[in-house]
Image (cartoon, grey):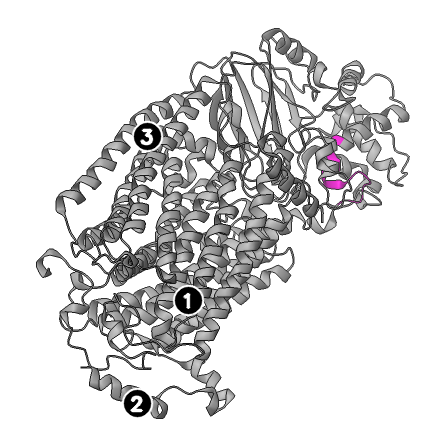
Amino acid sequence: MKGLSYLAAALSAVIAGPAAAEWGLNMPKGVTAMTREIYGLHMLIFWICVAIGVVVFGAMIYSLIAHRKSRGVEAAQFHESTSVEIAWTIVPFVILIGMAIPAAGTLIRVEDTSNSDLTVRVTGYQWMWQYEYVDSGVNIYSRLAQDSNAARQLDSGIDPNTVENYLLEVDNRMVVPVDQKVRILLTADDVIHAWWVPELGGKKDAIPGFINEMWFKAEETGVYRGQCSELCGRGHGFMPIVVEVVSQDEFDAWVAENGGDAAGTQTAGAGESASAQETASDAGGESTQVAQADTAGSDAGGGDIPMDTLMSEGEEIYNSQCAACHQADGSGMPAAGFPAMKGSEIATGSLDTHIDRVLNGKGAMPAYKDGMSDRKIAAVITFERNAFGNDTGDAIQPSQIKAKR
Amino acid sequence: MSHAHEAGHDDHHHHGPVTLKDGFFPWIMRWVSTTNHKDLGTLYLIFSLTMLFIGGVMSLIIRAELTGPGIQFVDPDFYNQMITLHALVMIFGGVMPGFVGLANWMVPMMIGASDLALPRVNNWGFWILPFAFAMLLSTLFVNGGGPAAGWTMYPPLVLQSGDSLPLMIFAIHMMGISSITGAINVVVTILNMRAPGMTLLKMPLFVWTWLITAYLLIAAMPVLAGAVTMLLTDRYFGTTFFSATGGGDPVMFQHIFWFFGHPEVYIMILPAFGIVSTIIPTFARKPLFGYDSMVYATASIAFLSFIVWAHHMFTVGMPVAGELFFMFATMLIAVPTGVKVFNWVATMWRGAMTFETPMLFALGFVFLFSLGGFSGLMLAITPADFQYHDTYFVVAHFHYVLVPGAVFSIIAAIYYWIPKWTGVMYNEALGKFHFWWSAVWINVLFFPQHFLGLAGMPRRIPDYATQFTEFNVISSVGAFAFFIGQFVFIYNMIQCMRGAGQKATDRVWEGARGLEWTVASPAPYHTFETPPTIDPREITAVPEKHA
């Protein structure tokens, strides 16, 4: 029924003219030399098609008007002309060659991933993205933002128009420096996905068992948005890609903040990151604080973390990482194969099984052992075992997780 | 020549088919056991229209869901089932049987044969289909729902299906058997049963395009059968053809699938070329321009269709050399396709045209199919395809070639030949209304999807960012309006089948030529039981040597 109101809105927009709405008509020019080149090719082939269309349809329309029986014309009986047929075989062929040459040049440049400044390994999951910065060790997971996720549920009662960047915002953005050639190594963990940010250039498939390469070199800072573009199941429409292009200094600060090593040495078990400080408010909310708390608490063990702290940190993680499938109230989506947390065998039964499931995953449930610190896993398991009326009273400590790794 | 047939026509009531007057059960059994090409043509066409209706309802569910951002009516998984089944039903249930039905009716009559060469195989080929589609559609009610991985069935996603997977695979096997038997029948008939004097280069172009299509079917359908069988063994028998963890390759499925899939595209359009090449000369009252080059262009397109498959998968990560090859080969298809369009325009040029409904749909085809051809040319440019791929631009492209392309041609063919089939003229005013209504709304439906795709909307998503709202709403309005208009067509055709309307002459159209117009209207149950002597004026082809 919401449809009817949109219909009314669209009709009024049509009447009010283009100014009333955002009417995206054409491919964006983008912010890289490559996207501008592709845009140029796109417009070139478009105008060639328009020109051919004008000639062919023009002749056809003239004929439809002039050569109709109602005007009393006698039908001619010619039915062959070898020279004309050779001409209209050769002329299109020549036009195509003229088109193929610049296209081949661009293609070869698009596929040249050499001499990159930065490499990010991007992994697609049902339904989120993982970004591992090979040079600095930063490792983040990026999911649909909470407000979009809440609004997208059937009968959510939330008007998507009130959600900023509906379906095109994530909790943790991919951050890259401006004017640097970023090489992306693409793969997937479960099914095929495709990584695409229109303003940074073409898409590429993320295929389990394969590593694909692509690159971009953004020339303007800003936030660029895209989506998974290969059907990957129920949540295919809900795994956006948001890339934030920042200055080199800001990028270095972001790397340091997210447990990365700017010098390029690998940091094992780097904590899950939050967004850049300045974007935290509209993206993940308090996630920055979580990250700091994580660093402060570290994985060293130390004294026991109090239950309250574990619960509040755990709730935060649960809402950003788990609630998309298991739901904010822990009821899951059993029909779609996502079990409930509330009163479940795992969340109220054996602790070992519970830890194992979070660390190693099962089926559609991703493994978190590489992407989440001991402390975070401890917090989220504590939350799951005590929220939703589960009330097991277990306060899990990071050391218990470390022992299971 | 015609005496024998008129005599046959007079005997119609004594030796003709069982009718409803002879009792309900005998009447049903007549249709179940019929080996008559005209009966089976009718069954195929009714089946095709039924499937177009079912697939159309699915598309309305899709368009209803897309009337605004946010999830409106259906679960995302059910949405995925709808896009998957919509495609399978429309392609294998709507368009392909539609063309097979037309081939059944017209190929024997056009070449002066009494029936298809293998009538029992023909019966079997048809009656597999209702069971295949009953099985396919029954998946909506099994555990896990219908197939939801898209009609392209890419692993590993498709292997996550519930119990629908084996049912879908067996349904595809059955459809494939049906298509292959039909294709073999067409080939054998055309090569062996032409009337004396009907040499290959005198055949009507519809017969030529179907001969080539039949070879495409025979070559392509077993490849699809192989691909889905490998999915089946991957799922149930422990093989790992498409799983990297077992040494397999998920991309190999895409190569195999599109090696079938691209010829499949031409299976759905070559007969349409034949139909348009038949209708335009009739209403332009002028012979088809460049008959020989039309035949050669059709054959070239068929050949090229086997060496361009990877343009469906430019983003899969191919070597640059491969991408270059498939880009050039794909662009090359524009040449023979262009020749066809130019020939149609040259056929109209200095003709004496009238615009009855079949002509209107054929002209609509030439305009709108060409638009789909232009977007196809754009998609061939690999670097640009990196931006277009898997967006609504692609959706707009293939719907332009399939709906105002293939489906319009089937509608045109039905209007063109139904007076011959039923002996009754359809209502011309309603036919014209049907055309203009369809031509307007099909563009409202699909044209805005070009803009959506260019602006960045991926295909196969049940929900979208708010900036895509306006064009989606317009597209949905077009979908519902287009669908409603088709009932005018159904009413018009039912009136013909009931015999209500003006009696058709044997020739039906002033400019019509060909053997089918030399028999009575309605066409007797059996035609050309003895081969006709061909009057040269009925040869639609005019190669230079016969001019």
Would residue B147 be visible to someone looking at this image? no
Q: Position of residue B314 (x, y in %)?
A: 41, 35
Per the image, the residue denoted by label 2 is B10
Res. B144 image quadrant = bottom right
Q: Which amino acid type corresponds to the residue marked 3 in the rendered image?
A: Ala
At x 58%, y 10%, the residue is A264
Is residue A350 or residue A383 the one in the foreground?
A383
Q: Nearer the viewer, mark 3 or mark 2?
A: 2
Lateral position of residue B2 relative to residue B389, left or right: left
Which residue of the protein is positioned furthest toward the front in this rendering? A71
Is residue B59 or residue B318 the one in the foreground?
B59
Q: Nearer the viewer, mark 2 or mark 1?
A: 1
Rendered view: B112 above or below B160? below
Chain letter for mark 3: B
Q: Earlier in the sequence, mark 3 or mark 2?
A: 2
Chain letter for mark 2: B
Q: Secondary structure at mark 3?
A: helix
Q: Secondary structure at mark 1?
A: helix
Rendered view: B218 above or below B343? below
At x 70%, y 18%, the residue is A279
Which residues are the magenta region? A320-332
Per the image, the residue denoted by label 3 is B321
Q: Earlier in the sequence, mark 3 or mark 1?
A: 3
